[in-house]
Structures are given as structure tokens and as C-alpha cells.
Image: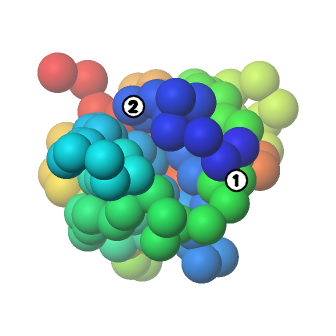
Amino acid sequence: MSHSDELRKGTVIRHEGRLFVVLDHTKAQTGKQKATVHVKMQSLQGGHATDRMLDQLGKIEEVPTEIRTMQYLYSSGPERVFMDTESFEQYPLGEELLGDGIPFLVEEDTYRFLMVEQQPVSMQLPP
């Protein structure tokens, strides 16, 4: 994928080996100049937001994602252990992935996770 019309909010892309979610994109054109597309995106590893021009991104690789439900089992040191409710696979997840959600976790409750390449990359907290 390399065209701005294929970008959508919420799309997960790989840039410089890291995963980002597209927050917004805007197209600007002045006079006869070539249009520039600005992409606002947020890192899924660390959460910082950044702006790039589409030309700076080069070829955009959209990464397939899915939403999976996982049950919070228990705390193990600095990590929290979750179990996929379909595959029963367990994932020890740290603060870098759970972030601000840690104080709201309740053992045995289920939570939705954004999965990329069979690995959880972010937790979706209920409102």
C-alpha cells in the first residue's frame, strides 16, 4: 500500500520496523505544487505520537490485525498474565503494553486486545 487514499484512521502500519496506528491524515496542496499528505500516527510500542509526510514513510505496509478477548488471570511480579479465551494461550504482559489500564484490572474479568501477528500490542479499556 502506498497511496494516501488507502490510509484509514485505525490502520496499523509498519514504519522503520516499528508498529504505528494511523490517527489522522490530511492532504494539502498549494498552487501547482504536488500535494503533500501529512500522517499523524502513534507508536504501539511506547505510545508516543508523531507526524510524518507520506513521502517520508516510503512504501506503507499495512499490518493485519484482529481483536481478541483475553481473561486477566493473575499478577506475577511486574507482569500481568492473561489467557486468550479461544486458544487458552497465556500471555505475560508488562506495564509498557498495559500502561494506564493496570489500576483498573480485575482478576477473572475479560478485556479486549488488539493483536498483530498473533501477539497482543494494546489493551482496549472499557469506557
How far apart are labels 1 and 2 at the CA level?
Answer: 15 Å
Toward the front, the furthest residue is: 32
Q: Is residue 91 left or right of residue 117?
A: left
- Say few, some or many: other residues with alpha carbon within 10 Å of mark 1 (under 14 / 14 to 19 / 20 or more): some
User: What residue is drawn where x is 77% and y is 50%?
Assistant: 117
- Say few, some or many: other residues with alpha carbon within 10 Å of mark 2 (under 14 / 14 to 19 / 20 or more): few
- Residue type pointed to by label 1: Glu
Secondary-structure class at tag 2 = loop
Is residue 110 or residue 40 the one in the foreground?
40
Toward the right, the furthest residue is: 87
User: What residue is drawn where x is 70% and y is 53%?
Assistant: 61
Q: Is residue 94 left or right of residue 2?
A: left
Residue 61 bears which disc, if any?
1
Which quadrant of the figure contains the C terminus?
top left
- Residue type pointed to by label 2: Lys
What residue would you read off at disc 2? 9
Q: Earlier in the sequence, mark 1 or mark 2?
A: 2
15, above or below 34, in the image: below
User: What residue is drawn where x is 60% and y is 78%?
Assistant: 16
43, above or below 63, in the image: below
Is residue 84 or residue 73 the one in the foreground?
84
Q: Quadrant of residue 29?
A: top left
Secondary-structure class at tag 1 = strand
User: What residue is drawn where x is 27% and y is 67%?
Assistant: 50
